[in-house]
Amino acid sequence: MIIVSNFLGAMAAVLQMILWLYMWIVIARALISWVNPDPYNPIVRFLYNATEPLLYRVRRSLPVFAGGLDLSPLVVLVAIYFLQSFLVQSLRDLAFSIR
């Protein structure tokens, strides 16, 4: 059972790091959208390609607010925070309880 516990603990740690990294990618994408970035810049293209599939799905389900305010990065950040608080912590607690 120690192997399963260690595996779940490692999975929780890796998931935490992936969510943390994606959170910063979404924040960078939101910040870069305030300026007029060069669409051919490799960094801008990476940020766009990494975040657009998820942001597009969220954008489709959100109503459009006055002025065209895009709240999809905020919704994604709240979802990431929820996953970090609920899913990662649940995996850690499960790994601890198995020991």
Image (cartoon, rainbow, N blue to C red):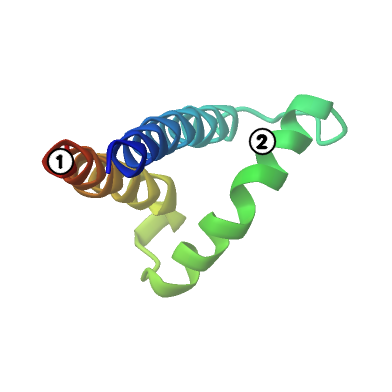
Mark 1 secondary-structure assignment: helix
Residue denoted by label 1: 93
Residue 36 found in image quarter: top right
Say which of marks 2 and 1 sits in front.
1
Mark 2 secondary-structure assignment: helix
- In the rendered view of the protein, which quadrant contains the C terminus? top left
User: Looking at the image, which is closer to me, 48 or 99?
Assistant: 99
Residue denoted by label 2: 47
User: Looking at the image, which is closer to me, 99 or 38?
Assistant: 99
**Which residue occupies 73% across, 31% down?**
44
User: Looking at the image, which is closer to me, 7 or 27?
Assistant: 7
**Total tally of numbered discs in the picture:** 2
Placement of 43 over or under 70, stated as above or below: above
User: Looking at the image, which is closer to me, 43 or 21?
Assistant: 21
Residue 53 found in image quarter: bottom right
Image coords of residue 77 (percent x, y): 35, 42
Name the amino acid, label 2. Leu
**Which residue occupies 61% across, 27% down?**
35
Q: Earlier in the sequence, mark 2 or mark 1?
A: 2
Placement of 17 over or under 89, stated as above or below: above
Q: Residues within 10 Å of mark 1 (few under 14, many from 20)?
A: some
Query: With 60 as the anchor, is 64 left or right in this view?
Result: left
Q: Residue furthest left?
A: 97
Query: With 20 as the anchor, is 83 left or right in this view?
Result: left
Placement of 73 over or under 65, stated as above or below: above
Q: Residues within 10 Å of mark 2 (few under 14, many from 20)?
A: some
Query: With 55 as the anchor, is 9 left or right in this view?
Result: left
Image coords of residue 66 (percent x, y): 35, 60
